[in-house]
Amino acid sequence: MSRASNKEMMGEEFLDKGALQEGSLQDPSVWNPSVERVSERVPLPVAVMIGAGRVASHLAPEWHRKGIRFKQVYSRTEESASALARQLDAEAVTCIEELTDEADLFVVSVSDDALQQLLPRLLKGREKSLWIHTAGSVPMQIFQGKAERYGVLYPMQTFSKSCEVDFSKVSLFVEASSEAELCHLKRWASLLSPHVYEADSQKRKALHVAAVVTCNFVNHLFTLADEWLTQNGLPFEAMCPLIDETARKVHTLSPQEAQTGPAVRGDRKIVEEHLHLLESNPNLQHLYRLLSESIMQTHGQ
């Protein structure tokens, strides 16, 4: 199946309201502001950002540029809270007890472990506001019984503080505790990107697995390749055109169609030669063998 037909399945071209209300990734709810004009009446919130890490440092300033006012930024460290707060014209706080109870929206963007630990203290006295988190693998139900209104906005993108992100190209996955809160989240998410999907916690967790494989694992392979090239007196920059073309192809071809290399050809002689060359690097040799076998199995070699 071509990548173009896959995009149609994902619903990026669906504009009828029936399709938008399906709410599944098989026939998904890609929301388009031109369809649900009623959402334009949803007012922009006064918000508080909980966390000042990589996701928060991109998400909050982008929302701020689109008109959402942030009243406070909370972080455990003064340096992180102040750096982000300055971008948002907000107050920096490092003590949970100093958090306002007069915000419409609290956005929690911290590590999964910290989310579990902090929620009871964060929510105390602020239960009536809308609470959302940005994690891929944490269920929305983490708020259940603690907050009256809650949801999730998961931006499926890799974030580094030193690299700008074009949010208009980011896929955002939302769910909420009620239709009213979902309407709010869709409206506010659409300020960031036209690619807004509904996905429940189980589907979002599946997305997160795929994101780890296609982003985090691949970047780790870049790291290993960089080390190997350095050992052999070669620059990693030489790989960049190859990396770019590999990524570009899966916009128009399925990953299976785009696969190249000795393993997909069943060229075991080259594979064995490479494995012999990698004897000085057992970790990379192990991964090379494992991935080559997986490619051969996938492609019937």
Image (spheres, grey):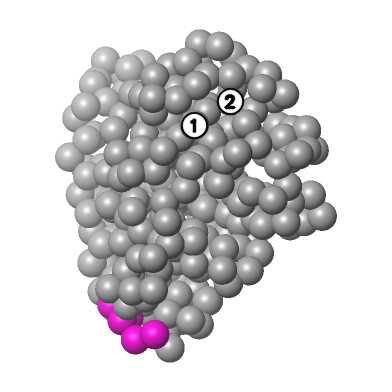
Mark 1 touches mark 2? (CB < 8 Å): no
Determine whether the residue tagged by mark 1 lies in a helix, strand or loop.
Answer: strand
Nearer to the camera, 254 or 177: 177
Residue at the top extreme of this rendering = 79
Mark nearest the camera among 1 and 2 is: 1
Q: Residue 137 magenta-drawn?
A: no
Residue under label 1, please give it.
71
Give the image quarter of residue 99.
top right
Magenta part mainly helix, strand or loop? loop
As rendered, which of 226 and 163 lies closer to the eye? 163
Q: Residue at x 23, y 21 (%)?
A: 235
Picture residue at 43% right of the left edge, 88% below the top: 18
Q: On the picture, is 277 further left or further right than 24?
A: left
The 10 Å Cα crowd at callout 1, few under 14, some 14 to 19, many 20 or more, is some
What stretch of residues is rendered in magenta? 13-17
Look at mark 2 in the image and give the residue it sits on. Answer: 74
Determine the residue positioned at 24% across, 20% down. Answer: 234
Q: Give x and y (percent) for residue 142.
A: 74, 51
